[in-house]
Image: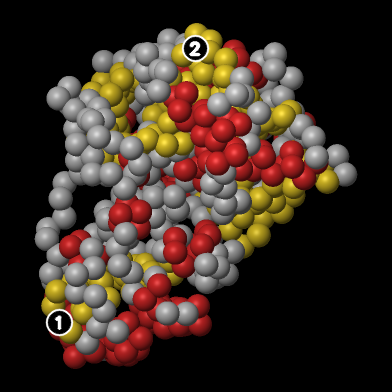
Amino acid sequence: MPNILAVAETRGGALRKVALEAVTAARAVADAAGGGEVHALVFGPPGMSAKVESLAQHGADKVIVCEHAAYDKADAESMSATIAARAAGCPVVLLSASAQGKDLAPRVAAKLNAPLLSDCLTVQLSDNAVTVTHPTYTGKLIATLKAAPTPVVVSVRPNAFVPAVNAKALAAETIAPATDPAASRVKVTEVVATGGAKLDLGEAPVIISGGRGLKEAANFKLVEDLADAFGNAAVGATRAVTDDGWRPHADQIGQTGRLVSPDLYVAVGISGAIQHLAGMRTSKTIVAINKDAEAPIFKVADYGIVGDALEIVPVLTAAVRAARQSH
Amino acid sequence: MKIAVCIKRAPDMESRFKIAASGTAIDETGLKFDMSDFDGYAVEVALQINEKAGSGETTVICLGPDVVQETIRKALSMGADRGIQLKADSVPADSLAIAKALAAELKDGGYDLILFGKHALDTMTGGGGPMTAELLGLPCLTAASKLDFADGKATARRELEGGAELLEFPLPAVVTIDEGIARPRYPSLKGIMAAKKKPLDVKPAQLGEVRVTVEKMELPADRPPGRIIGTGPDAVPELVRLLQTEAKVL
């Protein structure tokens, strides 16, 4: 039975949601291929091994915790060496296609001399080959790719796998890094928070996004208020708006920015240029508020309202607050 | 600095794509091609570093059939000094095979800095940079949104989800470039004329074994057609009702 090695991502000594998604994906791949074990590999500072129960809850047969004081931050050189060292005998090494996972996965693939399949929506292992689906051409096309022979390194797109409980007894093992993080040449000197306490775009169930239709940077306050009203929302922006410096580049949703698929996407004052649609068209429900009834955003919006965003959004914010309070 | 920038030719992403008869690729008929977006940022970063230093050389490297010479000329017209085409009949879907060809070319080049875009907009894999770094044994950092060279020390910033890392690294190194770092310049007429005379070497690509194949290329499932539910603030109660009862997201 093939065992799958899943890298469960942490930041600042805490598991991220993508960690549970990676373990869920690995569990599904292992079960479909005949029921091998899932080995979750976690990097964190000393004490991390006390915080990995949820990985067993989501289907990891074994949790390998690589503890080192350096791992309150990422250290790609020693982490990729450790992943490669633990990959022996695993036909699939699975990571998240997050900023960290997209950095680690190619390094691991090169170390193992294994093919890489990036940013996958589905993953299948059979007959010594791995077949995946992967969005290409900025998400306008879906490619089915096949890599053989195994081992193959795979990264899975955040939000493509919904964390599923599949409880196993916790079997944890603590290991040391395969190479000394102190010897790594690239050093992370600092991790700065850019979103404050707000939810990240890749993890928020609801995204409220603003475009030029808001007329000026100060009016993003309306978008933030609506996000507050939902309580579980992050704020995004179009490229036009980030290029003009109204919002940081990191908030840009689109083909060159973040690719998101939340449960609800509310596009405020966004016309729906192709480059923006590429970043959000896989959202489950799309709401659009725009004054131009002919704007392309209305072609993909499940619910569109034509009108001035500056008038409509405050009314919607109040209505959402009222609806949530009546629960 | 002696800088190499590895670039890729990709179709204009605003195009309406059609699937080729083979079912495993796009139909390239009538498509406009250019340098992939992030690679344009990487070329710009290289040019700015050397302009600021007042010395240095920028080499652009592109793998593919002869049509990629157009893409190399674009980078030369922006101001790069010389180009290298690693000639291959097509660009494989296997990024490790490509990285092996790039590493073979870069190995003895004596480059201080090797830049890539963070990923190509067509294949969206982002493997080439870190893989090439591994093969060359060089330090690597990905998706840099800021780069600084001062007092013999290189520093960078890379964006994470909801945060950013500040990093320090030694040269030589491989760095992949995110957008927002610099706005790629348009080639001037003078630049376009000068590019015609700049050296462009053609060498066979020493691709590694290709182990990734495209089995199928398809359009994503269509969304149901959009629906406008009303006009102005009066439509808000109906929207809230639909979000609660139909979409069940509120």
**Amino acid at pointer 1:** Gly
Toward the viewer: B222 or B40? Answer: B40
Determine which residue is flagged by label 2: B205
Q: Residue at x 74, y 47 (%)?
A: B148
Toward the viewer: A37 or B67? Answer: B67
Q: Secondary structure at mark 1?
A: strand
* Quadrant where the image shows the C terminus of chain A: bottom left
Quarter residue A223 falls in:
bottom left
Quarter residue B19 falls in:
top left
Give residue B230's mark: 1
Q: Is residue B107 visible?
A: yes
Residue placed furthest toward the right: B151
Q: B55 above or below A305?
A: above
Expressed as whole percent of the image width and height from the top left, the position of residue B46 reads 66, 38
* Quadrant where the image shows the N terminus of chain A: top left
Sequence-first tag of 2 and 1: 2
**Amino acid at pointer 2:** Ala
Toward the viewer: A297 or B49? Answer: B49
Q: Is residue A203 visible?
A: no
Q: Could you confirm whether marks 2 and 1 are on the same chain?
A: yes
Q: Residue at x 35, y 41 (%)?
A: B12
Q: Is residue B118 left or right of residue B79?
A: left
Tell me the crowding category of disc 2: few under 14, some 14 to 19, or many 20 or more residues within 10 angstroms, Cα based: many
On what subunit does the disc labeled 1 rest?
Answer: B
Expressed as whole percent of the image width and height from the top left, the position of residue A106 reads 51, 29
On what subunit does the disc labeled 2 rest?
Answer: B
